[in-house]
Amino acid sequence: MSGRILRLALLGLSSILLGISSVPAAEFYRIPLPADAREQARLEQKLPAVLHYYSQLSAAELATFYQQQLGQPIQQKQHQQQLQLYFQRNGEQIRVVIAEQQGWRDVSLMVEKR
């Protein structure tokens, strides 16, 4: 499944799931998550693996959190009110997408092989 299709599917799913109670999440593919992360969807049986969660941290706080955890991003984009951060670690490419969703930050983590 292409990254764009996967992202669109997750964004559609997020609008449906926003009203459903969620569970706390601690980490994904050895990537720590903020303490307030509320997991909405997890697809990790094969790569690309995806975790989708909500947070009340600001986009800037989330970007700082991931830079502290993963180092400086190799690329950073602002696209249609979404902040996209790209990191590389141990042969994996990690993409963090942060968007605003009804007062929460809607965060998707995608992990794939380089």
Image (cartoon, rainbow, N blue to C red):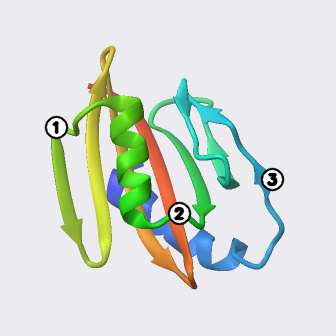
Instruction: Tell me: 51 left or right of 108.
Output: right
Callout 2: SS: loop
Which quarter of the image is occupied by the C terminus?
top left
Please give the name of the residue rendered at 83% of the width and 67% of the height, measured from the top-left corner: 21
Q: Label 3 to label 2, Cα distance in Å?
A: 17 Å
Closer to viewer: mark 2 or mark 1: 2
Badge 3 or badge 2: first in the primary sequence: 3
**For residue 110, above or below residue 105:** above
**Tag 1: residue type?**
Ile
**For residue 55, above or below residue 81:** above
Instruction: Tell me: 91 left or right of 111.
Output: left
Q: Name the residue under label 1.
A: 74
Q: Mark 3 points at which residue?
A: 23
Please give the name of the residue rendered at 79% of the width and 60% of the height, measured from the top-left corner: 22
Q: Name the residue under label 2.
A: 57
**Tag 2: residue type?**
Leu
Please give the name of the residue rendered at 28% of the width and 35% of the height, measured from the top-left corner: 87
Badge 1 or badge 3: first in the primary sequence: 3
Look at the numbered discs 1 and 3 and tell me whether their residues touch, using CB distance below 8 Å: no
Callout 3: SS: strand
Badge 2 or badge 1: first in the primary sequence: 2
Please give the name of the residue rendered at 33% of the width and 39% of the height, measured from the top-left corner: 67
Residue 112 in sight here: no
Q: Where is residue 45 in the image (x, y as percent from the top left)?
A: 62, 30
